[in-house]
Amino acid sequence: MVLAAGLGTRLRPITDTIPKPLVEINGRSLIDHALDRLALAGVERVVVNIHYKAAMIAAHLARRDSPRIQLSNETELLDTGGGVARALPLLGEAFFAVNSDVFWLDGEAPDAVLLLQRTATAVGYDGNGDYFLDVSGNPRRRREGEVAPYLFTGIQLLRRQLFDEVPGPVFSLVRLYDRAEAAGRLAAIVHDGEWCHVGTPEGLALTRERLASRRAER
């Protein structure tokens, strides 16, 4: 959802004649910048709430091909929360909500993003962990003799360019993670749910036991 119903009072006198979402930066309106970013992220349908100079915004959006736009016309201004609440019948279970009066430039994406799990919460895992995270959340793979608080879950998001230079036809992905880490192009996210190690008979048994207990809890 893109929020575009506001009066734009802080941008007066510019917004006396044009709604704030249609104010241009580098020849493109603010709302188009927001919609472009959403389209790049794969969003196919966007709900836009309108109120102030609604007809101008509606006519502007009608010229776009993608993403597909649905309008939520507010006869009275509902503020940000009320605007989203009114539009809920048009929205899915989870959705982006973006102000139309903001402009941002994305940083360069990392070559690899690893999903990590706290070793203390992993089911069936008894290893020494794989990664540390510094105060900024940057991962560092543990060295020999160290015990790390996070393990690599085996789930990752990779960019094709990570494979531009490979050490040969047979190699571990860890080689590429290390190279990305050294270049400052490795990132990590800590999983907030459960993770089970099923690579050993003991881990498999514990995983089955855990799933059985969850069914019993329900």
Image: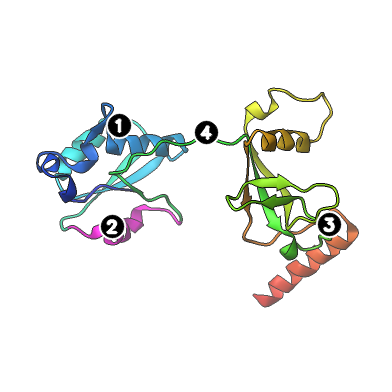
At x 77%, y 63%, the residue is: 123
Identified by mark 4, the residue type is Glu
- Whether the magenta-drawn stretch holds residue 30 is answered as no
At x 43%, y 40%, the residue is: 43
Q: How far is disc 2 from disc 4 in space, using C-alphas?
A: 30 Å
Whether residue 96 is visible to the viewer of this picture, yes or no, is yes
Circle 3/circle 4 CB separation < 8 Å: no
Q: How far is disc 2 from disc 1 in space, using C-alphas?
A: 24 Å
| Mark 2 vs 1, N-terminal side | 1
| Mark 2 vs 3, N-terminal side | 2
* Residue 198 location, quadrant: bottom right
| Mark 3 vs 1, N-terminal side | 1
Say left or right for 19 vs 63: left
Identified by mark 2, the residue type is Thr
Image quarter where the C terminus lies is bottom right
Dot 2 corresponds to which residue?
80
Dot 1 corresponds to which residue?
64
Q: Secondary structure at mark 3?
A: loop
Residue 127, disc? 3
Q: Secondary structure at mark 1?
A: loop
Residue 168: image x %, image y %? 82, 23
Q: Secondary structure at mark 2?
A: helix
Span highlighted in magenta in the image: 77-93
Is disc 4 surrounded by few (<14), some (14 to 19) or many (20+) residues within 10 Å? few
Identified by mark 3, the residue type is Gly
